[in-house]
Image: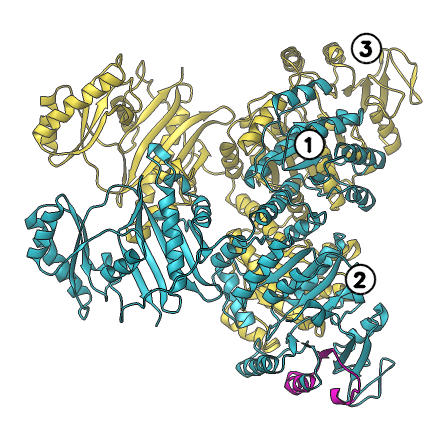
Chain colours: A yellow, B cyan
């Protein structure tokens, strides 16, 4: 098993394509090794020079007599394969390839890259790149990167780690994090990912004790299973993974495909899976940096009750707005604590947001008194305070910081973010007292919401998942509605029962047995969209009507799909009124089987109000899928209706997800549409199973 | 008519409650006047001292022999009224009151504040405050404020103006804007607004030539009409109004009421009105500051086609995602321009986002070549470029700036925001070349979207509004459905016709005349929610059924509302299938009559998918209301349905809005629910008019 040290803590490094010019790509790392104090052996490889930047050089890797742990390749693409083979022979642990000209460039490049993958698999040498910007390990001053930004800024070793597919963007993340005062030991760019990829990188970082927070950037994930594993390692260790996933938009996804020559996968699935496994997905870079910053105290609140303190009523209102936007609970202070506050300052607002007013300038004990009451009586999961621009007046800022620290005594497991304008010195004072400082009060609350989502994901832990049984093989050939319903029903899913009528007389007889109005649907494994061919008639009453309708359905289906194998018409009782849902599963190219649930009609088709999870899921996880729907209220008894039986829906979601996994080699997609939710139970009125071809 | 100069450019100022101690509220402004170079006369007023901070003092305002333009009041609340009366007698133009203890404190305080309002109205003296932090006019070094922040930071005069109800938050806005390098001449806090309020302040700022951008903060607006006027003055002058409106959430709005003792008004209406009159509403402070910053070049793009250039494919993807989030159009480059780009650099992405790649480091002419093609051939309304952390390497940053400036030659009316990490010096270089610099590429695009929305609002100009006719008086007493329908139909709105049956026999006869199934509804001015009392039956066929149903409706309505005046039952033909909408109007306490349109059922009740405008509106404005609905697709022929007749809906919205204004003294609300939208026309199936009481 590879560890982070195997990749990033070499005792020796060879630079193939070493340049004497420290401005060139093959020269920069050597300059950095020497200037920044890397203490391992440095072996420049250059057939044309004996000495490179003052260090003895070697014509080839094989000419180096000592061991070489890490081989950095900075030669043109056409020479790369040979160098990597040589490195494998030399038993290097890691090869890192700056060179571009592989899958991002051409079909020939893609083939060469596949060959790199093969060499890695066969020999065991791990490869970073090609087409990457490099990596660093600040703990040992190891900076094999040609980024000019790194060197202009030298990181302070610490708990943040950055891993990025994109080199340019990875460098940007580094600079912004560094400027925000974040300490980081590891920085990795993975480029084209012929071997080491972002998913594995996250796992290796999560396993490393020096890493506390992981900031990742990717456009696509090569190994969904590995990502899930990495995220679970991070969750178990309570290390937030802040995951920037680019390509949320159609045009963004198209750009990903064009510039990485890889399938981006569906963004909604990424989004769901990242949430499912406890990662936090920011939209913007600054948001990512801010969450990483506020994660530094390693306190992750496990609840949404938020206390808001301010010296400006206006800011209190803005923070309450922000809390509502982020679905936090601005719970009221207990009545007796409010009375105590009013005793301290009659014209304060004591409810929450708590407004201590500008009066604090005259009496700093108010800060301690009020925030102490919020901490001890308010029982908030997390607090945010607003102190305006007090931080720019040094004596004022320091006094507030001390007053807050006093209130926090014995509460140092509580996260209290402070929103104030302050210079670096003042900020440092607050940070050392354990308070992250975020200027914008709205952003302070938004960042707290992110940390709360991390905390709740950590507390929830790895979700229990159902066992996957061995299921009997599917029947041969395409599956019609009746067959699909039987397969699902046999596995315990709730399906409407129906009778296959093969003549108009049989149809009438079936309808009579059922009594009341019936639903009639064409039965054919070759017709998937039955409504479109006039193959569905609902609420038919009376024997004659049923007979006529039978003939109409057969005729219009035959007319629409001339070669379809027609088995007859399915007759079933009309289901009771309820809320129509859609329940489905499909195989995602990145993450494998995923289960999908939504409300029917406009919710699915117009509002895209659908939730996904990687399968299999427990009924408990399924409940989360329902809750996140915008239209969830419809299932819970909105508009005076009786609430639907959520337990039965959760059970169906879970069962379907299990089945999708059990049959993932054979089934491409399953759909129960509509799944009608009722006050007691739910029932699939139609079913569709599409096999893999 | 008051001008900004009348308020903020006094030739003389008196400070009542002047203190010799520059740390006290009555001392700070005097220190600032002297230290920062205010050149007008300064008259400290203090009955106990002859000299205050080295300046001759006077026992009372009346003892000052010269004219006093501006009177600053810093005495306890109980003395304020007398001082203000004296100031009015002394013919001061402006009185500004720091003192608190008015409407924010108690009922007695509110009464005292009302008296201040009366003095202002009667004498013509303008009053700022009470309970305010002060104002400044940096052009004449006039800083009558006790904010300690202002003084620590001295503004550079320039085009930004800040106006804020909240003093603490206003000071915060000042500091953040100042730190972002924004130049501003005017800063106003309005406090309790007994006279001058944020709405009028916006108008005065918009009318002032020195002001280019207005950054406003308010929790509630006292004069909706004045705000609309101010926004239209600003729009006509192409001055963006960046309006932070706090209290978007229920809990935020409750906090506003508790700390300002005023009704906050409905946030959705504020939101709609701000958009309608061209203001930009940010959520977070940083967003507000960023938009103000990027507005400095005064270029406001009038279209959503955005060109995205980058040296990192990843950042290009993130920018495309951001553009999609903000509903911008990442239009593809023309094919021939793409070919030209590929000639410049074969492995570039030429589509849009355009990826010039890190190759620019080796060849800066690529920057000029690519961005020139985007400017000249791409015909984008606006551009954003991403240059990673190039700005931290001075020679690289400068080279990129020069290369971009070269491409811009002859295009200096185009806004090109640059996203890069850079120190203050480098940023200044870019800004002087006309490029706003925003580190985060996502935020750069979001900010551009804000400027585009300003540009489009400026270009659209003041919307045409229909004339308001004199309408005949309404009938006396409450109005039943039949009366409401008649009033609306008489004004030209489309309503279903119906027959009032006063017996079961009349009902059956009416149904027979209509033919086909009918709708039957209880007719009573006292029953507003007919469905709830069993007063509505739909699709009734056959004379006997109609008779029976008549009796049932009468019986259940009587049972539910025993004293209701029952007129009979309305019989109408069942309307054709269509999309049910809701169209209504009501009187908002801040902005007067507003019109509302939404889709019926779950869209209105669960998703709150409803749009508002201040009435009256033209059919063109009404179309904007439809377009902004999440479910708008349903009206446009989603799911294979025939598109609805939008013209007829727009016409109905406009007509209803006109009627609401014409009757705004008498009508509290009007509702057509459902208004059924059809492929041809639309028709109100029910109507309700509630009179003002």
Q: Which residue is mark 1?
A: B375
Q: Is residue A309 visible?
A: no
Say which element carries label 1: helix
Vertical placement of residue B555 versus B102, above or below: above
Q: Which residue is mark 3?
A: A62
Query: Are the residues under badges 1 and 2 in a single subunit?
Result: yes
Vertical placement of residue A500 versus B306, above or below: above
C-alpha separation, residue under disc 1 versus residue under disc 2: 39 Å
Q: Nearer the viewer, residue A358 or A94?
A: A358
Image quarter of residue B469 = bottom left
Lower sequence index among marks 1 and 2: 2
Q: Which residue is mark 2?
A: B154
Task: Identify the residue at image location x=10%, y=31%.
Answer: A513
Image quarter of residue A472 = top left
C-alpha separation, residue under disc 1 versus residue under disc 3: 52 Å
Image quarter of residue A145 = top right
Magenta-span inclusion, residue A535: no
State the extent of the magenta-drawn residues as a range: B59-87
* Chain at tag 3: A
- Whole-percent x, y for residue B252 in the image: 53, 62
C-alpha separation, residue under disc 2 versus residue under disc 3: 66 Å
């Amino acid at each position: 098993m590879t560890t982070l040290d195997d990749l990033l803590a070499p005792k020796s490094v060879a630079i193939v394509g070493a340049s004497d010019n420290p401005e060139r790509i093959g020269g920069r790392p050597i300059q950095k090794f020497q200037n920044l104090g890397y203490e391992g052996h440095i072996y420049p490889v250059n057939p044309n020079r004996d000495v490179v930047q003052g260090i003895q050089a070697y014509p080839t890797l094989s000419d180096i007599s000592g061991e070489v742990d890490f081989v950095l390749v900075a030669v043109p693409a056409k020479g790369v394969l040979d160098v990597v083979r040589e490195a494998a022979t030399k038993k290097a642990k890691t090869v890192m390839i700056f060179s571009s000209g592989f899958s991002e460039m051409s079909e020939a490049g893609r083939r060469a890259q596949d060959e790199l993958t093969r060499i890695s698999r066969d020999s065991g040498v791990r490869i970073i790149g090609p087409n990457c910007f490099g990596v660093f390990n600040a703990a040992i001053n190891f900076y094999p990167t040609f980024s000019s930004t790194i060197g202009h800024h030298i990181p302070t070793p610490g708990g943040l780690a950055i891993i990025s597919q994109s080199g340019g963007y990875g460098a940007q993340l580094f600079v912004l994090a560094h400027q925000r005062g974040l300490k980081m030991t590891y920085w990795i760019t993975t480029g084209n990912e012929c071997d080491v990829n972002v998913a594995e990188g996250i796992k290796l970082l999560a396993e490393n004790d020096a890493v506390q927070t992981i900031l990742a950037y990717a456009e696509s994930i090569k190994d969904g299973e590995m990502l899930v594993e990495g995220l679970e390692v991070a969750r178990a260790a309570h290390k937030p993974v802040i995951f920037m996933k680019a390509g949320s938009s159609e045009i963004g996804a198209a750009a990903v495909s064009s510039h990485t020559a890889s399938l981006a996968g569906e963004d909604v699935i990424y989004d769901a899976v990242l949430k499912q496994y406890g990662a936090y997905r920011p939209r913007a870079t600054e948001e990512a940096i801010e969450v990483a910053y506020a994660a530094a105290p390693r306190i992750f609140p496990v609840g949404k009750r938020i206390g808001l303190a301010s010296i400006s009523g206006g800011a209190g209102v803005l923070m309450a707005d922000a809390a509502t936007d982020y679905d936090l609970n601005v719970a009221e202070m207990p009545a007796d604590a409010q009375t105590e506050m009013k005793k301290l300052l009659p014209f304060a607002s004591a409810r929450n947001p708590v407004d201590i007013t500008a009066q604090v300038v005259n009496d700093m004990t108010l800060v301690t008194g009020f925030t102490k009451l919020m901490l001890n009586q308010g029982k908030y999961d997390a607090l945010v305070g607003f102190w305006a621009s007090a931080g720019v007046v040094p004596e004022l800022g320091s006094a507030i910081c001390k007053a807050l620290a006093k209130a926090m005594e014995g509460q140092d497991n509580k996260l209290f973010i402070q929103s104030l304008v302050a210079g670096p010195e003042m900020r440092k004072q607050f940070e050392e007292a354990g308070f992250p400082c975020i200027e914008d009060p709205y952003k302070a609350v938004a960042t707290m919401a992110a940390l709360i989502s991390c905390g709740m994901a950590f507390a929830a832990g790895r979700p229990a998942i159902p066992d996957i049984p061995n299921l009997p093989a599917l029947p041969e050939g395409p599956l019609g509605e009746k067959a699909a319903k039987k397969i699902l029903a046999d596995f315990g899913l709730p399906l409407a029962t129906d009778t296959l009528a093969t003549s108009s007389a049989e149809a009438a007889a079936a309808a009579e047995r059922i009594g009341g109005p019936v639903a009639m649907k064409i039965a054919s494994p070759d017709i998937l969209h039955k409504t479109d061919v006039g193959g569905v008639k609902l609420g038919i009453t009376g024997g004659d009507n049923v007979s006529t309708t039978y003939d109409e359905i057969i005729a219009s289906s035959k007319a629409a799909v001339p070669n379809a194998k027609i088995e007859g018409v399915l007759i079933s009782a009309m289901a009771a009124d309820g809320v129509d849902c859609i329940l489905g599963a499909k195989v995602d190219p990145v993450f494998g089987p995923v289960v999908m649930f939504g409300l029917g009609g406009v919710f699915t088709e117009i509002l895209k109000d659908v939730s996904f999870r990687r399968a299999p899921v427990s009924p408990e996880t399924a409940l989360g899928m329902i809750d996140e729907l915008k239209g969830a209220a419809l299932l819970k008894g909105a508009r005076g209706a009786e609430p639907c039986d959520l337990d039965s829906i959760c059970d169906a979601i879970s069962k379907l997800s299990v089945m999708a996994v059990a049959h993932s080699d054979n089934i491409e997609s399953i759909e129960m549409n509509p799944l009608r939710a009722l006050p007691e139970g739910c029932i699939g009125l139609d079913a569709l199973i599409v096999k893999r071809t």
